[in-house]
Image (cartoon, grey):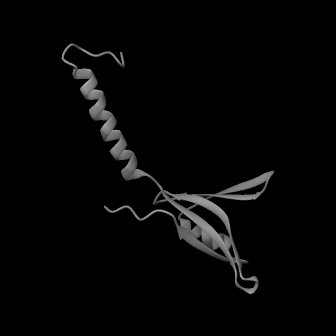
Amino acid sequence: MMGEVTRDGSQECGEQRLLAELVELSAETAPRRFALGLLDIQHDDGAVVGWGLDFGDEAIAYLPVDDSFQRFLRTGSADHARRLLARRDDVRLIWLDEPVED
């Protein structure tokens, strides 16, 4: 039963150790955040058109269109999401997190 502690505190110590390992694993395997920005050089303007998570072997991007519609892209990488949007516009990939070191 979770939460019960023996007289010597062994389950509590075990839970704390496992939780610490889980926190470390979560940080090590967390996806890298990115934004997709639209540059409009002619009008001296720019806008964020989407945000995403890069998992290393795939990426998911959230692209709000207006208050009632949004779309999600699931691609092989953050750069692939950028390339899909850049077919008509100057879209840039902006990393919000530093790369995780091995």
Q: Position of residue 95 (x, y in %)?
A: 51, 67
Q: Farthest top residue? A: 7
**With respect to residue 30, does 48 lie above or below?**
below
**With respect to residue 12, does 38 lie above or below?**
below
Q: Farthest bottom residue? A: 42
What is the tally of numbered marks visible in this picture? 0
Q: Position of residue 100 (x, y in %)?
A: 37, 61
Who is closer to the viewer here, 58 or 96?
A: 96
In the image, what residue occupies the spot 78% across and 53% down? 69
Q: Farthest left residue? A: 8
Q: In which quadrant will I find the N terminus? A: top left
Who is closer to the viewer here, 19 or 57?
A: 19
**With respect to residue 10, does 65 lie above or below?**
below
Q: Position of residue 28 (x, y in %)?
A: 36, 52
> Residue 71 sits in which quadrant?
bottom right
Q: Position of residue 34 (x, y in %)?
A: 54, 63
> Residue 3 sits in which quadrant?
top left
Q: Farthest front residue? A: 44
In the image, what residue occupies the spot 61% across and 70% down? 82
Q: Is residue 16 left or right of residue 41?
A: left
In the image, what residue occupies the spot 76% across and 83% down? 43
Q: In which quadrant will I find the C terminus? A: bottom left
Q: Is residue 98 left or right of residue 54?
A: left
In the image, what residue occupies the spot 28% across and 23% down? 12
